[in-house]
Amino acid sequence: MTQNAIHQNGKVEPANETQPQPFEQQAEEPIPGFRRVPRTGVIYVMHRATAQGFSYDNEAWANLGQGSPEVGALAGAPDRIEELTIDPNRHEYSPVTGQIELRQKVADLYNELYRTNKSSRYTYENVSIAGGGRVALTRLAAALGNINMGHFLPDYTAYEELLSIFKAFIPIPILLDPELRYQAPLSHLKKEILGRGLKALLVSNPCNPTGQVVEGAQLRQWVEMAREYRCSIIFDEFYSHYIYNGPTHGHPKMVSAAEYVDDVNKDPVVIVDGLTKNWRYPGWRISWTLAPKQVINTIASAGSFLDGGANNPFQRQILDLLNPDHVIAETVATQHSFRQKRDYMLKRLHQMGIMVEAEPTGTFYVWANLERLPEPLNDGMAFFEAGLEEKVISVPGVFFDVNPEKRRSYGRYRSYARISFGPPLETLERGLDAMERVITKHQS
């Protein structure tokens, strides 16, 4: 079915028939028994960029579409791991839920950061280790029952296929409005839960791509709502250390639903995080899930047939990374560096005439509204394609219209793009210079 475009004002327009499709070879006859699986947004744009000559070794390019932070040294940050020593005994399989030592280390970290005043404490039995965030979320999706599960629009592109592949639950979209700064009022969420019978809610907090954060009293109310209405909330907290509205000196501001959980084994709150973003080790593919023991046992069963367990040798290597002093020092340095990059990007985008309806208070993305740009650059896909000619990468907004199995016959966010300030500042400068050239070319 051809998707139409629906703008924020409600106007619906036919989809651009020439828009590139997630698969380059749609015309090929499928191999018997296999369906076509679309690439996620970032994978798609990287595939297109590589076809145009992009490589990480080619310094002429600027990848502002990347979903990972810079991984090198930052001023004031702890030293990066540069060597690994592997215990020969760790060549064996890991337990599906991970090594107990690491699981307890994760539990201790959350207790120290968020639960010093709570009598109910996380233990290793509340923690499961997995091979990255997608694996952790896949385990959770496989463990869900025959329920309605809410998810937000816009949100993380990989959620779309995740919400499509498992048929036990029905994904229910909840639209976030720019007029409300892409935040969901508590009263609206309660109506969704009661009216649609939601038994689970999937939330990226801070949100990818809008950079908005649910925190403080609002986050506490969400946890109370989950407890009262018995609706599980799955918090994807991979950007929870990228917070820019906190102090610029001293103890950094970090956000986690763990702070508001009363009973770790009864409150229906599930938290997923890992090394990818907050520790800036995306290639290590180590994540963890915190949840009531019952949930941990269930996702262990799912993991036993889905993936079999995380990388075993790496689990011992990361123990020191989870020491609270290390986490605080890393977070202070990260927030200082990324706040500067955020402010620089916002200033440059404003000068180019690119709107930002809600400045990001978290993540390392800007959700950019391109409506004021000259045609065809006011379309996120056209903006992306034009950027390739100047060797800069962005991600079209349509990829964040999470639409499992294409149930909706229209597309949102055609006039948006996600632009990342995850790369080093020099890459950011080069990429924004390239975007400026693209715009100038189309204005003349």
Image (tube, rainbow, N blue to C red):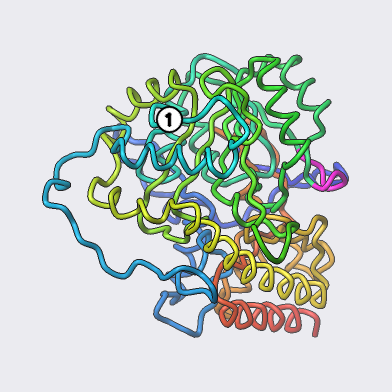
* Residue at the spot 32% in from the left edge and 32% down from the top edge: 97
Q: Residue at 82%, 72% (x, y): give it.
A: 350
Report the front residue among 154 and 406: 154
Q: Position of residue 100 (x, y in %)?
A: 30, 35
Q: Where, quadrant-wise, is the N terminus in this rendering?
A: top right
What is the magenta range?
Answer: 176-181
| Residue 269 image offset from top left, x and y in percent | 58, 27
Which residue is located at x 72 percent, y 42 percent? Answer: 214
The answer to whether residue 321 is left or right of residue 361 is left
Q: 103 or 136: which is nearer to us?
A: 103
Lateral position of residue 161 relative to residue 435, left or right: left
Which quarter of the image is occupied by the C terminus?
A: bottom right
- Which residue does the numbered mark 1 point to in the structure image? 123
Note whether 179 is above or below 265 in the view shown. below
Instruction: Say which quarter of the image contains residue 422.
Output: bottom right
Percent x, y of residue 6: 78, 44
Q: Residues within 10 Å of mark 1 (few under 14, many from 20)?
A: some
Q: Position of residue 56 (x, y in %)?
A: 42, 75
Q: Amino acid at mark 1?
A: Thr
Magenta includes 178? yes
Name the foreground residue: 20 vs 314.
314
Q: Is 13 included in the stretch rendered in magenta?
A: no
Mark 1 lies on a secondary structure that is loop
Toward which corner of the image does residue 33 lie, by quadrant? Answer: top left
